Image (tube, rainbow, N blue to C red):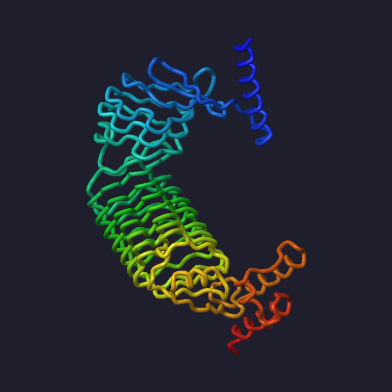
C-alpha cells in the first residue's frame, strides 16, 4: 500500500509540473523535467529536459568513442553539458549529430588522446575551452580555428595582427587567451558574441574595437590586457560581463554602449590610467568594485536613471574630484569605501547622496541641472519639451504620482513647482532662439 501511495504522489507531482508548464507556455508541448540520469552505450549519461530533449551530462572514464546519435528513445539530442567529457584520457573520437545546438564549457577539455572531431554547423553555442589540451586542436593549421556555426574556438599562431574571417558568428571563451604576440585584432560585424576570457592575458594588445552587431561581451574578456589603451564598444552591445577589463592598467579611455543597463562588478577594477568614462543614460546600476582602483579617474556623472551604487564601486579612486549623482533616491552602499575620500559629491538637496556625504564626512555640493535639459544630454531640444509633456500627461492620468526630482528641477522653467504645458513651451522657445542664433 505504501508503495502505491508513493507512486501516486510522484505521478500527481509530475502532472502538476506539466500542467504548470502548459499554463505558462500555452501552445508548446513539454516533457517532465527530471534529474534522473540514464546510461547510453554503457559509458555516456544523459537526462531528459523540460523540452523533451536529450542532454548529454557526463561520461565514464573508460569512454573511448563519443559517437552521439541524433535521437535516443525517439528524443532529439540537442546539448552536451559543461565538462561532460573533460579529462577522459582514453577518448579518441567525437562525432556529434546535426541535432546538437549547444556545447558547454570544457566539454572535451584535456582529452589528451582526442584526435578525431566532427561537430556540425547546427551548433550555435560553444562554451569556454571545449577542445583545449587535445591533440586535435594542437594539430590544426595556423590561424583561427572555426567550427560549428562559424564559431571561432581558438587561435593558433604568433601574428601580431589578426583579422578574424568574415562570417564568423561568435568568439568562444578563451579563444585568444594568453596570446602574447597579439597587438591588434579586427573583428567582423558578423560576430554577435564574445565569450568570457576571450582575450584574457593578451599582454601586447593595444587597441580593440567591438563592432556593431556584437550583443554581449563575456566576463573577464580582456582582463590583464596590460597594454590595452582604448576600447570602442558598439552601441549594439547590451551586456558586458563582470571583470571584463580588470587589470587593464594602460586603458585611458573607453566608449560604453548606449544600450548598456548595468555596469557589472569589477568591470574596470585596477584600470589605473583610466581618466574619463561617460556613463550612458540607460545604466541603472553600478556593480561592486566597478571602478575600484581607477587612480586617474577625475570626474564621473551618474544620471538620474542610476538606482544603485555597489560596495567599493568608486573606492581607491584617489584622483576622483567630482562625482555627480542626480538620482535623489539612489541606493549607495553604506560603507566609507564605496566612494573615495578625496571625491567631492554633487547631488540634489535632501538626496541620499547628501546623506552619504554627511555620514562619511565628505564634501557635498548641490548639483544644479541645466534649466530645460530634462533628458540630461547637455542640450536643450525638442526631446526635452516632449519629455515634459509626457510627464504632464502621466501625472494627469494618474500613471505616476509626480515626476522625478531631477526632472522637476530641470523642467520647471517657471518655478511654480509643477511640470506643465507652459514649461514645455518655454523649452521650445529657448530651442528656437538658439536655432535662430538669437542666444
The image position of residue 434, as x and y in percent, is 59, 84
Residue at horizontal 27 percent and vertical 60 percent from the top:
227
Position of 279 compared to 181: left or right?
Answer: right
The structure residue drawn at horizontal position 50% and vertical position 54%, both measured from the top left corner, is 238
Residue at figure coordinates x 63%, y 83% from the top left = 430
Quick one: 104 or 18, which is closer to the camera? 18
Q: Is residue 290 above or below residue 39?
A: below
Give the number of marks. Answer: 0
Q: Give the residue at the far top of this rendering.
A: 1
Where residue 1 sits in the image (x, y, percent)?
A: 64, 9
Residue 267 vertical position relative to residue 382 in the rendered view, above or below: above
**Residue at coordinates 33% horizontally, 68% vertically from top-left?**
295
When asked about the image quadrant of residue 96, the answer is: top left
Q: Which percent across, then down, holds residue 407?
A: 62, 72
Residue placed furthest toward the bottom: 438
Q: Quadrant of the C terminus?
A: bottom right
Find residue 93 and report its horizontal and vertical position in percent: 32, 24
Image quadrant where residue 132 sits = top left
Q: Is residue 221 left or right of residue 351?
A: left
- Name the one closer to the observer, 361 or 217: 361
Q: Is residue 212 above or below residue 90?
A: below
Say whether residue 51 is left or right of residue 155. right
Name of the residue lying farthest toward the right:
397
Q: Is residue 436 above or below residue 199?
A: below
Relative side of 119 to 307, left or right: left
Amino acid at each position: 500500500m505504501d508503495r502505491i501511495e508513493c507512486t501516486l504522489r510522484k505521478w500527481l507531482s509530475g502532472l502538476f509540473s506539466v500542467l504548470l508548464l502548459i499554463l505558462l507556455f500555452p501552445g508548446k508541448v513539454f516533457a517532465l523535467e527530471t534529474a534522473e540520469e540514464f546510461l547510453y552505450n554503457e559509458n555516456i549519461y544523459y537526462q531528459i529536459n523540460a523540452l523533451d530533449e536529450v542532454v548529454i551530462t557526463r561520461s565514464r572514464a573508460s569512454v573511448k568513442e563519443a559517437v552521439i546519435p541524433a535521437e535516443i528513445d525517439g528524443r532529439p539530442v540537442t546539448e552536451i553539458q559543461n565538462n561532460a567529457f573533460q579529462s577522459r584520457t582514453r577518448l579518441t573520437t567525437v562525432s556529434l549529430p546535426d541535432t546538437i545546438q549547444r556545447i558547454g564549457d570544457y566539454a572535451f577539455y584535456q582529452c589528451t588522446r582526442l584526435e578525431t572531431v566532427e561537430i556540425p554547423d547546427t551548433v550555435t553555442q560553444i562554451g569556454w575551452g571545449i577542445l583545449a589540451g587535445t591533440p586535435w586542436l594542437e594539430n590544426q593549421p595556423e590561424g583561427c580555428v572555426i567550427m560549428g556555426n562559424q564559431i571561432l574556438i581558438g587561435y593558433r599562431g604568433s601574428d601580431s595582427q589578426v583579422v578574424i574571417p568574415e562570417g564568423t558568428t561568435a568568439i568562444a571563451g578563451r579563444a585568444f587567451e594568453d596570446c602574447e604576440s597579439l597587438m591588434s585584432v579586427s573583428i567582423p560585424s558578423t560576430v554577435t558574441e564574445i565569450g568570457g576570457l576571450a582575450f584574457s592575458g593578451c599582454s601586447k594588445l593595444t587597441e580593440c574595437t567591438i563592432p556593431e552587431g556584437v550583443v554581449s561581451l563575456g566576463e573577464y574578456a580582456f582582463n590583464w590586457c596590460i597594454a590595452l589603451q582604448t576600447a570602442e564598444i558598439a552601441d549594439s552591445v547590451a551586456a558586458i560581463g563582470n571583470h571584463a577589463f580588470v587589470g587593464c592598467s594602460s586603458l585611458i579611455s573607453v566608449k560604453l554602449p548606449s544600450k548598456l543597463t548595468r555596469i557589472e562588478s569589477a568591470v574596470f577594477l585596477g584600470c589605473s590610467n583610466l581618466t574619463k568614462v561617460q556613463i550612458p543614460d540607460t545604466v541603472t546600476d553600478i556593480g561592486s568594485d566597478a571602478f575600484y582602483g581607477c587612480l586617474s579617474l577625475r570626474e564621473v556623472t551618474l544620471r538620474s536613471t542610476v538606482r544603485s551604487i555597489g560596495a567599493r564601486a568608486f573606492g581607491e579612486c584617489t584622483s576622483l574630484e567630482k562625482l555627480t549623482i542626480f538620482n535623489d533616491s539612489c541606493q549607495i552602499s553604506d560603507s566609507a569605501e564605496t566612494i573615495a575620500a578625496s571625491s567631492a559629491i554633487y547631488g540634489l538637496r535632501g538626496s541620499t547622496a547628501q546623506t552619504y556625504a554627511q555620514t562619511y564626512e565628505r564634501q557635498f555640493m548641490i548639483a544644479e541641472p541645466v534649466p530645460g535639459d530634462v533628458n540630461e544630454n547637455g542640450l536643450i531640444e525638442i526631446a526635452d519639451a516632449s519629455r515634459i509633456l509626457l510627464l504632464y500627461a502621466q501625472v494627469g492620468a494618474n500613471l505616476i504620482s509626480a515626476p522625478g526630482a531631477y526632472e522637476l528641477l530641470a523642467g520647471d522653467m517657471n518655478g511654480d513647482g509643477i511640470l506643465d504645458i507652459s514649461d514645455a513651451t518655454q523649452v521650445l522657445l529657448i530651442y528656437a532662439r538658439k536655432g535662430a542664433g538669437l542666444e
